[in-house]
Amino acid sequence: MKKILIYGLSLVLMAVSSTSLTSCIDETQPTSGATEDQVQQSAVATKGLLMAIPAYLNANYFGTTRVDWAFGYGAMMHIRDCMTQDVAHVYSDYNQFSGWATLLYIDRLYRNTQYLWNYQMKLASTSNNLIAAVDSTNATNEQLGYLAAGYAYRAMIYLDMAREYEFLDNDKTQPVSPEGNDISGLTLPIVDENTTEAEARNNPRAKKADMVAFILNDLQRAEKWIGYLNLSDKTLPHLDAVYGLYARLYMWTENYPMAEKYARLAIDNATTSPMTETDALNTTTGFNDGTKWMWASQQTKESLYSNLANWTSFLSCETYFGYGATAASPIMIDASMYQRLSDSDWRKLMWKAPSGSPLYGKNTYIDNALGEALPNYASLKFRPGEGNTDTYSTACVTDYPLMRVEEMYFIEAEAAAHQDAARGKQLLESFMKTYRDSKYSCKASSTDDVVEEIVFQKRIELWGEGQTFFDIKRLNYPVVRGYAGTNHSEDERYNTTTRPCWMNWAFVLSEENGNAGLSGYNNPNPSSTYTPWTGQ
């Protein structure tokens, strides 16, 4: 958790033919040795640029220093979850993500903040590399398919960052920067394939409307050409995922009719159905098989840097190695969420039932000794590969989800509920009774209550998948970790009355100093703004 001691590091430009912004870490993305002209002429080279994007999802790199928690896009997902109420960790020195839950090291001076910005901007730059190298007016159909996937990936990462860095009112900070400038309605600077170095050095935070237009333009191009993509690989976005990104975007803008429309288009075009109980609870495959999802990231033997710096190490509890292992810092579902979930809902078996509870003894473990040693509420959702508990080269070869069709059902239901509570309630009950709990009944009736129930069930469904953060921030929901019977560590028991101020991510100071347009327009420091609940 080192503080950044050197400020004003230069911006690095990382596109193939144009320039695009990263941040404090110098690194040029590979282009398979091809010049821009060669790339334009070669679908093989274009494909190489495309496949560099999903490969970078699992890149473990932090400048010249490799740290285990910086394991790529999966780390971004887990960081967002650690900032919600939904995920709790066993208190341990092995919990490398505690800084984001305890509000330590998350202001603009620390490398935690630097990593969030650098990694995501570098991920965006891999898309810029592809987009810059392909002239759509001269491209072959095959290249247009690759280009469409690049646009979809860029839309995904900018939509993530826009929602992370957007300043929204909360119960602790006002919409002004530390220097007193108005930051209401601002997201982050846009850097595309045409951004010059001079522009990057004076690039203000985009207004929300401008960011929405930028992302929408990318999605429209992706939708136009994605039919030419001749690769069925689930690590690449296809038409259903493009529609899913539209649905996420329109939820962010609160355009509920359009969100509902695109969620349904995503469902209708998906090649997968909601996971079954057998699929989800299987001790060998569990949540490891990306073929069951709309869009996935894949950990391969070649992408593994070690037994520690990867998704499985941190998210799988049933192993004899790794940070999330039984003997280290297993992850748990928030106790109050678990208790609220109906015992007739099979998803409840994805977490260890406490002794004396109705489901105690009904969990299925890969290894009974490991399972019995786990704490109450520990996750059984993300199993190690092939159910292997100790050989990391097998256990860590797993997939993790970027988008599942289940999310689209919940977006459709919530979007409908904002327009008509009864219709949203009907959609929720239909999904739940068909796929999750045949005895389910939604007791809510008002719009707010129906929406909250839909979002709660969505939080259960997508637990550990990095999406809850966006719903809490969007809907201005509080985070409550301190209560009688809580399973959150003492130093993480923060309670808020609205969306937490820490959900407005700060830009690392070195980036602010290197970009005159950003300087003085950072988000307020979220550290030390709350006092942990002590039972009083």
Image (cartoon, helix red, strand yellow):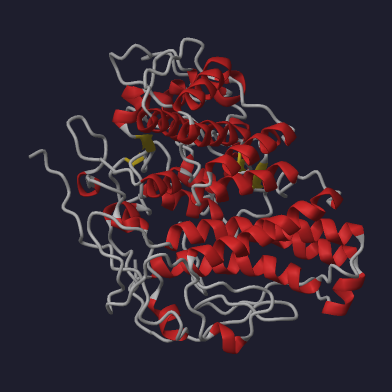
208 and 98: which one is in front? 208
Question: In the displayed structure, does residue 435 sit left or right of residue 79?
Answer: right
Compared to 197, does 536 lie above or below? above
Question: In the displayed structure, does residue 57 sit left or right of residue 105?
Answer: right
Task: State the residue at coordinates (47%, 42%).
Answer: 315
31 and 420: which one is in front? 420
Q: Quadrant of residue 38?
A: bottom right
175 and 87: which one is in front? 175
Q: Which quadrant: the N terminus?
A: bottom left
Compared to 202, does 126 lie above or below? above
Task: State the residue at coordinates (71%, 41%).
Answer: 240
Q: Which residue lies furthest to the left in this view?
A: 536
Task: State the residue at coordinates (83%, 78%).
Answer: 36
512 and 451: which one is in front? 451
Q: Is residue 70 visible?
A: no
In the image, residue 420 lies at what x, y percent? 48, 29
Q: Quadrant of residue 290?
A: top right
In the image, residue 525 lies at what x, y percent? 28, 67
Q: Can residue 150 be seen in this view?
A: yes
In the image, residue 151 lies at what x, y percent? 70, 60
